[in-house]
Image (cartoon, rainbow, N blue to C red):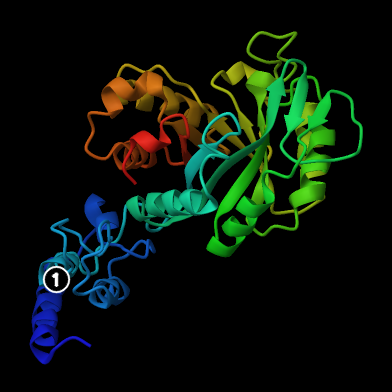
Amino acid sequence: MLSETVSGQLLILLLAGTLASVHAFDSVSLYDLNADGRVDMKDVAYVARHFGSHVPGDRADLNKDGVVDMRDIAMVCAHFLETGLNAGRAKVFVGWKSSPYGLQQEAEPAFWVSVARNMTWEIGNSIPGGIWVLGEAVGNKCRITFNSSAAYSNIVFSKTDENEEYLDAFDAAGLKVWLQVEPAEASVETLIDIVLGRYSNHPCVAGFGVDVEWLESDRYSEGRPVTNQEAQNWVARLTSYNPNYTLLLKHWLVDRMPTVHLANIAFVDDSQGFTSLEALINEFGQWGTRFSSSNVCFQIGYASDGGWWSELENPFRTIATKLLDEIPNCNGIYWTDETLRTVSW
């Protein structure tokens, strides 16, 4: 329990904060500790519960001086009743892209949960999760990271299940993930059946993703374009497992995408090699405009862009905030595991 003196100080600060905070500020997500798009008593209570904490990295230690005290409570109260950048719009998905050739199996489930949650703390009104790659292109085959005794054309399996413990952790933590494949020469509809036949029981699963760069990549440079009929077939197969599932189609070239934009498809741009934040926003903005009737998502954090984003005080928050500011149909922002451990979460 806080002392009467501290409680009195809290009341004074709260009243002062209420009078001072009557409109929205971009900085709100720093103080919106439960990421619900608004700074209110829940956030004050969060700091109060951690009062006196000296735990390194405690989010309640807002001024980062090593202790949660009245200075931190004052910071929340000064922003009382502010609403976040994303308040009033649909929640966006924020998190990581995790691949078997990256950090996926090197990191424990708790790592992925923690990073995704920290990302939502940076971006108000958001849902933690990510893109979980479990099908890797190896030559003309797709290697699936779980075991099976069944035989399919151009599909091979791992000796053990490499995903179940992670998906269990994501279920418990309330994350939402898309299970993505690099299909190579394998049938995408068959991959949907194999993957969702195995994992659709997990509440964390939000849909299925296809990295189009790897669609029949042995025969087509940078992947074969997806036809309208294929997209319709894939969505039909996907939603037969759950009508709320969505299909992520990923590429950086518009001409690899179908021209019919179904409601259950989100278009992901994973372009890289930008010279600046402005260049990234310009190109991603064009992607958002091209698919203006659909949700769009963006994969960021590549090493090839690190020359400029590494100079930002908070790379993820800065880039994500700008994307959400500039692109109204932005529905997801994912940091690649290529550089995930080089950024402080």
239 sits to left or right of 108: right
Corner quadrant of residue 181: top right
Q: Tally the numbered discs.
A: 1
Q: Looking at the rendering, in which quadrant would you find the N terminus? A: bottom left
Whether residue 230 is situated above or below residue 50 in the rendered picture: above
Q: Residue at x 77, y 47 (%)?
A: 196
Evaluate whether residue 260 shows in this view.
Answer: no
Classify mark 1: residues with Cα within 10 Å, few (<14), some (14-19) or many (20+): many
Q: Position of residue 324 (x, y in %)?
A: 38, 42
What residue sits right under mark 1 in the picture? 69
Whether residue 1 is situated above or below residue 247 in the rendered picture: below
Whether residue 201 is situated above or below residue 248 in the rendered picture: below
Amino acid bearing label 1: Asp
Corner quadrant of residue 204: bottom right
Q: Position of residue 207 (x, y in %)?
A: 67, 46
Q: Position of residue 264 (x, y in %)?
A: 68, 43
Depth check, front residue: 200 or 247: 200
Depth check, front residue: 194 or 83: 194
Q: Residue at x 7, y 87 (%)?
A: 5
75 sits to left or right of 91: left
244 sits to left or right of 339: right
Q: Residue at x 14, y 71 (%)?
A: 69
Evaluate whether residue 269 shows in this view.
Answer: yes
Label 1 sits on a secondary structure element that is loop
Whether residue 281 is situated above or below residue 242 in the rendered picture: above
Corner quadrant of residue 32: bottom left
25 sits to left or right of 332: left
